[in-house]
Structures are given as structure tokens and as C-alpha cells.
Image (cartoon, rainbow, N blue to C red):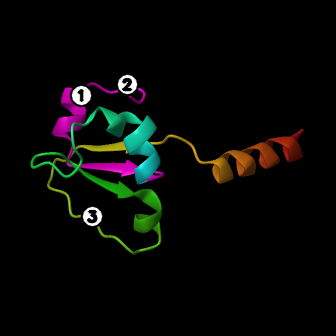
């Protein structure tokens, strides 16, 4: 199972979960705690990149619960490390 920093009840109550990588989050992130991501009543899991690129729009009620599940991607880690090295 994945990390458990957010209670399963809170995950289940979310309107949307924004993930850096849906596949990776289902395997190793908070989303791994969900029984089945396609099950009725389970929040939709959307990749942040799709939203930022305008490929996916999210309509949320007010108020809404949105959770970010960020497991870290190798490319992101490499870019952060390069910026850190440049700053030294």
C-alpha cells in the first residue's frame, strides 16, 4: 500500500484528487488506500498536468474538498536538484 498521510475517510469525502501521476499515486500514494478508483462514490483522480494544459476542466461544488496526491516524479526531482545546485 501507499503512504497514509490523509485519513481514508477524508480521501473518500473528497470531490477530486489531483495527482502528479495517476498510475503512480494509485500504486504508492494516498490513492492506494482507495478500494477501487472507479467505484461509485470514490472521488475522481485527475492528473495536475491535464488541468494545467487545459486538457481537463474540473467543475466543483461550493464548498468542495480537493486533495493533492504528489508522489514525486523523476523528472521533477531532477529539475529541483538542478535548481538547488545552481543556487549553491
Q: Which residues are magenta?
A: 1-21
Residue identifier under label 1 = 8
Question: Would you identify the image quadrant in which residue 34 lies?
Answer: top left
**Residue 79 painted magenta:** no
Left or right: where does residue 7 sit relative to residue 25?
Answer: left
Q: What residue is pinned by disc 2?
A: 4
Q: Quadrant of residue 33?
A: top left
Query: Residue 14: horizontal and vertical position, in percent?
Result: 21, 42
Query: Which sits in the foreground, 13 or 26?
Result: 26
Instruction: Kindly identify which residue carries mark 3.
Output: 58
- Residue 22 in picture, x, y percent from top left: 40, 52
Are circles 3 and 2 on residues that touch, CB within 8 Å? Answer: no
User: Circles 1 and 2: CB distance less than 8 Å?
Assistant: yes
Q: Is residue 7 above or below residue 87?
A: above
SS under mark 3: loop
The residue mark sitting in front, 3 or 1, is 1
Residue 35 locus on image (x, y percent): 21, 37
Amino acid at each position: 500500500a501507499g503512504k497514509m498521510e490523509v485519513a481514508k475517510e477524508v480521501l473518500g469525502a473528497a470531490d477530486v484528487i489531483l495527482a502528479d501521476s495517476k498510475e503512480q499515486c494509485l500504486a504508492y500514494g494516498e490513492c492506494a488506500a482507495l478500494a477501487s478508483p472507479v467505484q461509485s462514490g470514490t472521488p475522481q483522480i485527475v492528473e495536475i498536468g491535464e488541468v494545467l494544459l487545459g486538457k481537463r476542466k474540473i467543475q466543483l461544488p461550493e464548498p468542495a474538498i480537493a486533495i493533492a496526491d504528489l508522489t514525486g516524479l523523476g523528472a521533477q526531482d531532477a529539475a529541483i536538484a538542478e535548481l538547488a545546485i545552481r543556487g549553491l
